Image: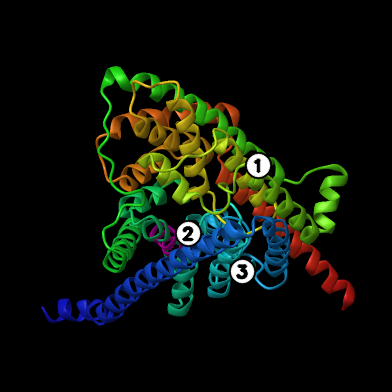
Amino acid sequence: MIERLLSLKPRFLAFPRIWLQQVLFWGGAIVIALAAILFAKMSTYGNGLFAAIIKTHFYLSFLITPAGFALVVWMTRRVFSGAEGSGIPQAIVAIDEPEIAERASVLSLRVAAGKILLTTLGLCVGASVGREGPTVQIGASVMHALGKWLRLPSPNVRRALILAGGAAGIAAAFNTPLAGIIFAIEELSRSFEERTSGTAITTVVVAGIVSMGVLGNYSYFGHTSVALGLEQAWRPVLICGIAGGLLGGSFARLLIVVSQGIPGRIGDFIMRRPVLFAAICGFLLAVVGQLCNDSIFGTGYEEAKGLIEGTHQLPGSYGLMKLLATAVSYISGLPGGLFAPSLAVGAGLGSNIAMWMPEVPAAAVIILGMVGYFTGVVQVPITATIIVMEMIDSQSLTLPLMATAFIAFAVSRLVCPSPLYRSLAQSFLEHKTRHATRVEEERRVSS
């Protein structure tokens, strides 16, 4: 009996450290939620500030947007390297290859702070970007920093922390805990190990509780009670699925091609003059904004919500113009995500389709358009379904949403066989590897 008690002594002594780690993990989840809340408020302020400026002085967009784009890209490259892009590819790279997080500095508190600052500045000058993707990198950075502070030796544990932080970021950004868990399974990690699931789920739940406690149990797009019967649903489901898959897949393929490098003189110009190129993109965005009555600037949240509720009258070209604005903003090199703008593009697409189906509730078609296009871009049908379902606070459209998402997924894979974020992660990794090799060669030559 004494020998058995002695054998249990090391385990007993390890309990305080285990509990300390758990408390620290929960603390990390709380920090992620608070950072997401701060980010949301700053983004809303940035959107509103730019809208107020151009409402009274519309011509200022031709000055503010190009100059702002140039400033943000300059700061990204000179001060906050690693904060470029949406943030999800960086998290994927760090999960797949944990040592990259240290070597390339893609996950750090400095990068997280830069992500919040630069994305907010982008919204202050009219960029068509979102905050949800960047919140994934912010959450992953917080948990990665926590793992480094605890000096956790296991690569699997560090990978689990990054995965949990990214998922918690989605949960807190959208106020949708279930979507955060599914996003971790479906996108951040293509395989979900049992040993990491507890950490991820716990972190997501804690972050979700904090977000709801501070902001309330709100829904991203309010509450929608619209429903579709089988005889009404099949046509909009089929059309929204096919159209969303084609349009979203084409958009994703465009971003992948650009991330791999544009050949010829244009590509050389972008590489040599990134700040000037960003200013040109800002000017193009201002032109698109003027053609669309300034409705394509910012995240697109208010426009999408207005279309669902029937309170906004937007140009018929809104969906395509918002797609163009998002492409220009992303290609310019600004930090910022694709989630919110993609939902806005999908809402515009659904609104166009609803005009040809007067017998079907317009709000339902718009919501199906959102999930169809969103799935077409990111190719995560279950995540897309749950995010939209939780955002509208309704389960009445669950089956039509799922059917639309899987049709869009199948069509998008025909147009864009490689998933967007995985391809962007690979391009990001190759770029960082080439940069590190070049720096090492220059160091050797100079020494």
- In front of the other: 111 or 184: 111
| Any part of residue 102 in sight | yes
Write down the residue under mark 2: 136
- As for residue 160 lying within the magenta part, the answer is yes
Write down the residue under mark 3: 105
Left or right, 242 with reference to 402:
right
Q: Residues within 10 Å of mark 1 (few under 14, many from 20)?
A: some
Identify the residue shown where x is 25% and y is 23%.
Answer: 229
Point out the residue furthest to the left here: 1
- In front of the other: 153 or 329: 329
Quadrant location of the C terminus in the rendered image: bottom right
Query: Dot 3 lies on which element?
Result: loop
Write down the residue under mark 1: 291
Alpha carbon separation for disc pair 3 and 1: 40 Å
Q: Residues within 10 Å of mark 3 (few under 14, many from 20)?
A: many
Identify the residue shown where x is 31% and y is 61%.
Answer: 208
Establish if 177 lies above or below 29.
above
Q: Amino acid at mark 3?
A: Ser
Left or right, 118 with reference to 261:
left
**Which corner quadrant of the image does residue 324 belong to?**
top right
- As for residue 73 lying within the magenta part, the answer is no
Quadrant location of the N terminus in the rendered image: bottom left
Magenta region: which residues?
Answer: 159-168
